[in-house]
Image: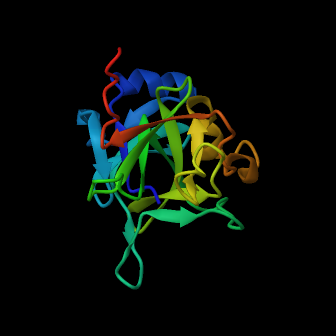
Amino acid sequence: MCNLYSLKTGDLFATWNKVLKLPVVWDGQASNFEPRPEIKMTERAPIVRYVAGQAVVSMMQWAWRAPTGKPVFNYVSESRDFSKSDRVLIPADAFYEFTAPQPGQKRKTRWKFTMVDNPLFWIAGIVKSGCWTMLTTAPGPDIAPYHDRQIVLLSAEQGRDWLDLARPQEEMLAPAAAGTLNVERDFPPEPADLFS
């Protein structure tokens, strides 16, 4: 499951205003957000909520605690109704999945996923107990070779639809179509091409 993503995009405020077609306001603490190449589970990160016709950006912790004490950082979306949930968008420019180590390595192989033609995209999420989590669904063809689940991905333009449920949630919570994602091995690095 996804427990690492990045947000390095430069002028976030202008970008979000444009793609959400909503006034974007900061809740007072998020405006000092610095781009981050690695956002890890349980860290605070920016999310976007729909409040009184505005997109409100807040800094909030990723993952609430289950009754067992374990962090809930991903949440299965199938057969759930999110119409009354506190729906949020998690802005990202990449996310990572892990597979078995490469031969001769001890650490797992880390794969970086970015969205084709979308330097900024959204991950669908919900808030509970003052923390947020990412929603997951069945894997699309681009992710299936690397993991048996995928986070729910929305293009920059689809974000508002999740906030105000302008489209049926089943359409938005679907696996990513083939060709939606670029994938590259992030660790260990690919061997250098001796002939390039």
The residue lying at 67 percent from left, 49 percent from top is 175
Quarter holding residue 187: top left
Give the x, y percent position of residue 116.
Answer: 56, 27
Q: Nearer the viewer, residue 94 or 178?
A: 178
Vertically, is 101 above or below 186? below
Quarter holding residue 160: top right
Q: How many marks?
A: 0
Outermost residue toward the bottom? 68
The residue lying at 33 percent from left, 23 percent from top is 10
Left or right: where does residue 24 sit relative to residue 85? left
Vertically, is 72 above or below 146? below
The residue lying at 34 percent from left, 56 percent from top is 108
Q: Nearer the viewer, residue 134 or 167?
A: 134
Give the x, y percent position of residue 190.
Answer: 35, 35
Q: Nearer the viewer, residue 101 or 53?
A: 101
Give the x, y percent position of residue 137.
Answer: 63, 58
